[in-house]
Amino acid sequence: MTTLNICPLITPSTTDCINFEIYSGAKDMDRLPGEPDLGAVSNTVIRLLRPVPRHVNHIIYFDNFYTNIPLVHYLTNEGIYCLGTVQRNRLGKSCKLPEKREIMKSNVPRGTYHENVASHEGLELSATSWKDNKQANIQISCPRVVKEYNAHMGGVDLMDSFIGRYRIRIKSRKWTTRLFYHLLDMTVINAWVLYKKVNTRKGKLQKNIMKLADFRTELADTLCRYQSHSKNKRGRPSTNSQQDNTVPSKKPRTGAQVLPPTDVRSDCIGHEKIFMESRNKCKFSNCRKLTSWFCKKCKVSLCDNKNNRCFALFHA
């Protein structure tokens, strides 16, 4: 699978995958009107950038596998800025940046950099060469363009890292099955990233925002509790449908009641009230009165009388 993270000026911690392409071998892909043919690699970038709005100051970052002058020229004319590492031989024979063997000499100190600006078909391009390849605890100067690249590059690697932490581990020899679970993992990561963005903008403290493991656990709990109440159900009618609002044949375990996720509480689906023979403490906040009413879906005891409307408030 060939994936490319595209994002505006944001930190990698909030980068989400907005487009991807499944590699199925080298072949010609259909180009839209106005799209140039810049080769297989550059054409992949152009296809992945189709959903990105033009002329709104978006910036795309890529590594030296994708960077070349024709691609940079096309994207800039489309109103998409770009920044990436590049092989020197892709800058043309007239490139005035020093050769690698020259800049790697021992008499050239770490932190040395050279920047050249050139014009290509009316477009100004800047190329910077910076020496930094040895581990040492010393302070060296760093060009701003390198800082920008290091701050925003790595979205694809970050996505792969998140997926690898809690990957769905179901083995299968079918590539379609493996691909399905990979896309499912990617969808969960995107949902988590959006969840963090929304809560951060609402001013929620970072310590109160769920970590990835907690988010996946709550998501699984929510999906497991989901019940469809479609009236036109296929198959034979369930015998349990005749026992609604009656005392269940088997008493549920009420000794260890755990509050369900918020999405389950407020989905307005399947929250049936059941009368229990025994009485348990109400699980609504600030209410610990004994009650015989029990939510069939949430698996918690809740008051429901003229003085305490905990059942309705809990699911609001």
Image (cartoon, rainbow, N blue to C red):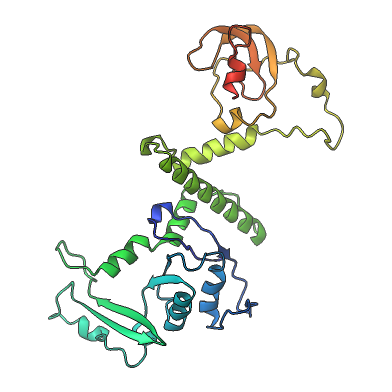
The one of 73 and 127 positioned closer to us in this rendering: 73
Residue 135, position in %: x, y?
21, 65
**Residue 136 in view in this figure:** yes
Question: Considering depth in this image, is 44 or 71 the residue closer to the camera?
Answer: 71
Q: Is residue 301 visible?
A: no
The residue at 15%/79% (across/down) is 108
Left or right placement of residue 155 versus residue 25 in this view: left
Q: Residue furthest left?
A: 107
At x 65%, y 12%, the residue is 293
Which residue is at 58% across, 33% downward?
A: 263
51 versus 170 height, above or below: below
Please give left or right for residue 58 compared with residue 234 in the image.
left
Question: Where residue 231 sits: x, y (%)?
Answer: 82, 33
Looking at the figure, which quarter contains the C terminus?
Answer: top right
Q: Quadrant of the N terminus?
A: bottom right
Percent across and percent down for residue 18 are 53, 59
- On the rendered structure, is 114 left or right of 152? left
Q: Residue furthest bottom?
A: 93
Write the residue at 59% across / 55% down.
183
Residue 221 % position (x, y): 58, 34
User: Total of numbered circles in the picture?
Assistant: 0
- Judge by depth and name the residue closer to the eye, 94 or 76: 76
